[in-house]
């Protein structure tokens, strides 16, 4: 994800930088970079990837000093994404000198799936519906639903709301949720309030920051729907091309201008996101504290962004996993990106390997084992996890 060290409150401290971390600019591709350590007396980087063999339309390349994933992709005519997927490099896509990489030939990536049959023109929201669930069931995307129905970036919907599934002429506009509140009375339950007000329990929990028990008290004022607002323009993507130093500077400047939550609020955002996405909150909190000390305003010198220290290419992976656009500069999206990546790693690895993979990359951990700094990272996270239980 990012540079790491023993003190989570100073994520930029030079001593925290592993020599294996990404530190090169992307070359003509929107994907991860990783620099092979140059050594104390490094020779000039090779100008071409060393192809050891060609098998079934792909090359096998041995990584040389100074190589980057994006550089190898550019020289071989492949793509960063193809190399990352072919070698299971993980979110950070780190490579090291001597490592052998499979490099798919141009045009050999799996084709995009054929579009699903055209969905019905409308969908009426029922209790428990979510935009992502509707998108999956109807063969569309969350982004398309938001655009077709004028929803805000959070995509809140309510029971009974009619959503347009296509942009065809004459299709009615879906109603917009209007701001409203409800004051809890004695004997009220979330499910009862949801049924009476035409919303869902999930929406009430999300809007009001409730925990998984849905605990409410008499006299508490609950928000029933988000306030109306104009549909925002798509967020500008993080800078990740050109000079790495320039990209880092631009992304730091963007965060410096943003209205960001404090550490305590960011901690709660990460906790609530982990609960919602089915990840152990103590693990997500331990990762967030180790990465940044819950500081949303940081960008590492490898261009890892925000509290969960997610590099832009890993943000794209998180978008694919979630089926929605991710803005790494948005605190809630930053938390979602880190947590969904963590969820994916936990689902396919033992706990210590999942933690190590968040730091070092899953493919690297599996093929080369944990580096010394990775072992320290895992130990720190496990200690912090016990603290956050």
Image (spheres, grey):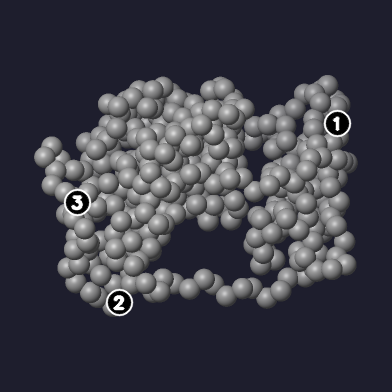
Q: Is residue 10 above or below residue 114?
A: above
Q: Are marks 2 and 3 in contact (CB under 8 Å)?
A: no
Q: Secondary structure at mark 1?
A: strand
Q: Are marks 3 and 1 in contact (CB under 8 Å)?
A: no
- Foreground mark, 2 or 3, reads 3
Q: Is residue 248 above or below residue 115?
A: above
Find residue 381 and report its horizontal and vertical position in percent.
37, 31
Residue at image location 72% in from the left, 32% down from the top: 208
Residue 48 left/right relative to 302: left
Q: Residue furthest bottom?
A: 56
Q: Quadrant of the N terminus?
A: top left
Find residue 279 and report its horizontal and vertical position in percent.
51, 41
Label located before the other in sequence (3 or 1): 3
Mark 1 neighbour class, 10 Å CA radius: few under 14, some 14 to 19, many 20 or more: few
- Foreground mark, 3 or 1, reads 3
Residue indicated by mark 3: 45
Q: Secondary structure at mark 2?
A: loop
Label located before the other in sequence (2 or 3): 3
Q: Is residue 207 above or below residue 136?
A: above
Find residue 383 and report its horizontal and vertical position in percent.
36, 27
Residue 316 visible in the current orientation: yes
- Foreground mark, 1 or 2, reads 2
Residue at image location 19% in from the left, 63% down from the top: 50
Which one is in front, 288 or 283? 288
Residue 308 visible in the current orientation: no
Mark 3 neighbour class, 10 Å CA radius: few under 14, some 14 to 19, many 20 or more: few
Residue indicated by mark 1: 182
Residue 138 figure quarter: bottom right
Residue indicated by mark 2: 57
Q: Is residue 331 above or below residue 185?
A: below
Label of residue 204 in the image = none
């Amino acid at each position: 994800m990012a540079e790491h060290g023993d003190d989570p409150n100073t994520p930029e401290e030079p001593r925290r930088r592993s020599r294996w971390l990404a530190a090169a600019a992307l070359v003509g591709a929107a994907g991860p970079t990783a620099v092979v350590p140059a050594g104390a007396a490094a020779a000039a980087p090779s100008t071409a990837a060393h192809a050891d063999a060609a098998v079934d339309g792909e090359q096998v390349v041995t990584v040389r000093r100074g190589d980057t994933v994006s550089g190898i992709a550019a020289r071989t005519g492949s793509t960063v994404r193809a190399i990352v997927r072919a070698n299971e490099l993980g979110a950070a896509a780190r490579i090291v000198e001597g490592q052998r990489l499979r490099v798919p030939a141009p045009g050999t990536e799996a084709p995009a799936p054929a579009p699903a049959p055209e969905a019905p023109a409308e969908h009426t929201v029922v209790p428990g519906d979510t935009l992502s669930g509707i998108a999956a069931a109807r063969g569309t995307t969350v982004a398309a639903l938001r655009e077709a129905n004028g929803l805000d970036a959070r995509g809140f919907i309510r029971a009974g709301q009619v959503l347009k599934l296509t942009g065809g002429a004459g299709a009615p506009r879906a109603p917009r949720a209007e701001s409203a509140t409800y004051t809890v009375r004695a004997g009220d339950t979330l499910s009862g309030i949801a049924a009476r007000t035409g919303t869902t329990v999930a929406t009430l929990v999300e809007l009001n920051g409730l925990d998984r028990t849905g605990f409410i008290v008499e006299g508490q004022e609950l928000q029933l729907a988000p306030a109306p607002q104009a549909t925002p323009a798509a967020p500008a993507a993080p800078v990740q091309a050109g000079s790495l130093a320039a990209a880092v500077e631009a992304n730091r400047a963007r965060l410096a201008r943003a209205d960001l939550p404090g550490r305590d609020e960011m901690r709660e955002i990460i906790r609530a996101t982990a609960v919602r996405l089915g990840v152990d909150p103590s693990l997500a909190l331990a990762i967030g504290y180790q990465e940044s000390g819950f500081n949303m305003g940081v960008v590492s010198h490898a261009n890892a962004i925000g509290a969960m220290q997610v590099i832009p290419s890993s943000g794209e992976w998180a978008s694919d996993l979630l089926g929605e656009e991710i803005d790494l500069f948005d605190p809630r999206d930053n938390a979602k990106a880190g947590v969904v990546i963590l969820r994916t790693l936990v689902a396919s690895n033992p706990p210590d390997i999942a933690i190590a993979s968040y730091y070092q990359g899953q493919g690297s951990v599996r093929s080369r084992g944990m580096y010394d700094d990775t072992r320290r990272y895992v130990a720190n996270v496990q200690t912090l996890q016990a603290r956050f239980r």
